[in-house]
Image (cartoon, coloured by chain):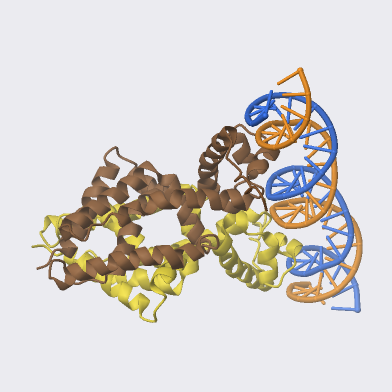
Chain colours: A yellow, B brown, C blue, D orange
Amino acid sequence: MGEAKTIPRKTRIQAQNEELILKAALEVFSAYGFRGATVDQIATSCGLSKPNLLYYFRRKEDIYVAVLEHTLHDWLEPLRSLDPAGEPIEEITRYIRTKIRLSRDNPKASRLFANEILHGATAIGAYLKGPLKELVDEKAAIIAGWIAEGRLNTVDPHHLIFAIWATTQHYADFEPQVTAVTGNPSDLMAKAEETLTQLFVEGLRPR
Amino acid sequence: MGEAKTIPRKTRIQAQNEELILKAALEVFSAYGFRGATVDQIATSCGLSKPNLLYYFRRKEDIYVAVLEHTLHDWLEPLRSLDPAGEPIEEITRYIRTKIRLSRDNPKASRLFANEILHGATAIGAYLKGPLKELVDEKAAIIAGWIAEGRLNTVDPHHLIFAIWATTQHYADFEPQVTAVTGNPSDLMAKAEETLTQLFVEGLRPR
DNA sequence: TCCGCTCTTGACCAAGCGATCAAGAATTAA
DNA sequence: TTAATTCTTGATCGCTTGGTCAAGAGCGGA
């Protein structure tokens, strides 16, 4: 064997262009979905030629999977930081606040996942059944613990988490509808945050 | 002028085939979205040839708009029947129950709209800003009235409606994720209904 | 400087898809 | 039955799009 094969280092240009591509891909995929987006759009959007883009990611699907994985970690961070040692109501309030602000500041990521799941989650199905399920189960157990201690109203933890996801991400995923119905006032998201935290807190505080 | 032009009557075959087409179109569009769906798929799915299908709907978009409009009315019926004369908590409980059951029994309609709005609501934007906004404003006013009478906890009615939409439709739109995380037990939807009604009722009941 | 490797691109291909058309089959009204 | 109308389809067109290829330009290490 002799020398160990040198691990293929990532070039400066490589790292730089891949970042450009992923950024543009998030933009385009979140707007048009996987099938609606075109490689040309992504290439133009980041100033590369189509063959050049396909030099870095050989297939359209490779770009898609890469941008999904690249975004997934950040998207789940708020749930990950739900602290079992914290005060229950406070922890959940913080979670809701963080989630809704994430929806406001990064709606494209929300739409990317929404579209992926809406169409069957074929690219991230394994992730959902594996790491995601584990994380959710872990956090659900914490919530169940809080309930058992009488520090939260009795409620199914999994469905509570679904409800928080649904309500917070709604403002990113269904933005045109929200805007159409409310007329998009400047305090929209602040009002949303206030309403949701209140709703959940009142719904969860033990009586 | 003479005789008035006879209004073009709709043939038996016409009515029959259009129904077939709309049914198949709901199936296909809800699964793949507008751009992801193909006219061939819809045609095959309802046993017609592609040119024959295009004889009834000249453009792909015409089919899409038709199936959207055809489904929209039913989808909003539950909100429409929110009764100002009813008991507030009871009315909202009934609304949530109806919505979640509609999501369970007709998830395809839910996904069709979700996809449409997620991608900018270009086909139904006008409807959202017009009739939908009117309906929501009307029902929001009813809820505001209940709050003013002290029969509901203070909460922004529009955002409350969004929260109900989001949580109930979540089970249709994000079904793969819900299934992956929960393992899809037989009492899933029953548990969802119970959790959501409880959450909203506790959150809304005046203290 | 020189050489090997990485990067870039214009041209091109095959497949898929929306849409058209002409011509024939079926249906309906008289 | 007959004639007009409606319905159906095989063939085909034009365009988009994912992906390939060969050849050249640029870059970095010796």
Say whether residue A190 is visible: yes
Q: Quadrant of residue A85?
A: bottom left
Quick check: B12 above or below D23?
Answer: above
Q: Is residue A198 above or below residue B75?
A: below
Q: Is residue A173 left or right of residue B8?
A: left
Residue at (31%, 52%) from the top-left corner? B78
The residue at the far front in this view is B2
Q: Position of residue B6 (x, y in %)?
A: 62, 45
Q: Depth check: give the residue in front, A9 or A73.
A: A73
Place of residue B31 in the rendered image (x, y in percent of width and height, measured from the top left): 52, 46
Residue at the outermost bottom position: A186
Q: Nearer the viewer, residue A92 or B198?
A: B198
Residue at (50, 47) in percent of width and height: B30
User: Considering depth in this image, is A16 or B114 the residue closer to the camera?
Assistant: B114
Going 34% across and 52% down the picture, which residue do you hit? B77
- Residue C8 in the figure: left or right of residue A132: right
